[in-house]
Image (spheres, rainbow, N blue to C red):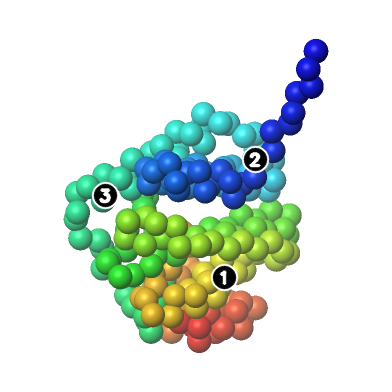
Amino acid sequence: MGRKKKSSTSFIEVVTFWIIYNEETYRLGACLLWYYWKARNKKIFDKSNLVFKDIYKSALHNYNDFTSELLQDTPTKSNILLNHQSLVTCDERWIPPPNGEIKINVDAAFKDFIYAVAVVGRDLEGKFMGCITKIGKANSAEQVELSAFSLGLEFSNRFTNLVTLIEGDALKVSTWINDLTSNVPWNLLPQVLDARFSV
């Protein structure tokens, strides 16, 4: 009997293969990674089971939405820009940013005072422009969502010559940052003010 050599393909090798193979493979791979990340967070923070069928279904749905949006060549929704950055809440499907702009999506997971936030940037064609993650401890879901937006703002500093749109699913938090008249809880005010000054 011969020896079986272990295969140890790294994450970077997989993504590099996707990029080299073709653009569609890369886009689908990015969608799969995003939904694996979300499922991983649910498993860790909510103790829910990983259902691979749901991961694949969601990734494929997201990929199809994105691809159909590119093919339709329809104008995107208007965003409120503040100093070349925008904080908006997300639609059910990803909408590409206008030409020459970067869209940064932020997401957060929180349970038992432990959180994880992720940020990913893409251009009009869905081209991956980079990502960043952070884990830590917090006292509330709102504090975690603020951390996600703050990390998105920090990440946007990489794109100094481009308009950056930051999109997340926390309407309350994006309102606190965008609306100077909004009623922010006192314990979150320093974090909100930091985010406002970063915009």
Amino acid type indicated by mark 2: Thr
Whichever of callouts 3 and 2 sits on the residue coming sooner in the sequence is 2
Whichever of callouts 3 and 1 sits on the residue coming sooner in the sequence is 3
Whichever of callouts 2 and 1 sits on the residue coming sooner in the sequence is 2
**Distance Cα–Cα, label 3 vs label 2:** 33 Å
**Where residue 76 sits: x, y (%)?**
25, 61
**Where residue 120 sits: x, y (%)?**
49, 60
Amino acid type indicated by mark 1: Leu
Residue 9's mark?
A: 2
Residue 141's mark?
A: none
Q: Quadrant of residue 14?
A: top right
Q: Secondary structure at mark 1?
A: helix
The residue tagged 3 is 69
Q: Do we see residue 150 in this rendering?
A: yes
Q: Secondary structure at mark 2?
A: loop
**Where residue 93 sits: x, y (%)?**
36, 49
Image quadrant for the N terminus?
A: top right
Between circles 3 and 2, the one closer to the viewer is 2
Amino acid type indicated by mark 3: Glu
Residue 151's mark?
A: 1
Q: Residues within 10 Å of mark 3 (few under 14, many from 20)?
A: some
Give the residue displayed 56% in from the left and 66% down from the top.
Answer: 148
**Distance Cα–Cα, label 2 vs label 1:** 30 Å
**169 relative to 1 in the view: left or right:** left
Note whether 180 is above or below 8 in the view shown. Answer: below
Q: Residues within 10 Å of mark 2 (few under 14, many from 20)?
A: few
Residue that extends furthest to the front in the rendered view of this protein = 2
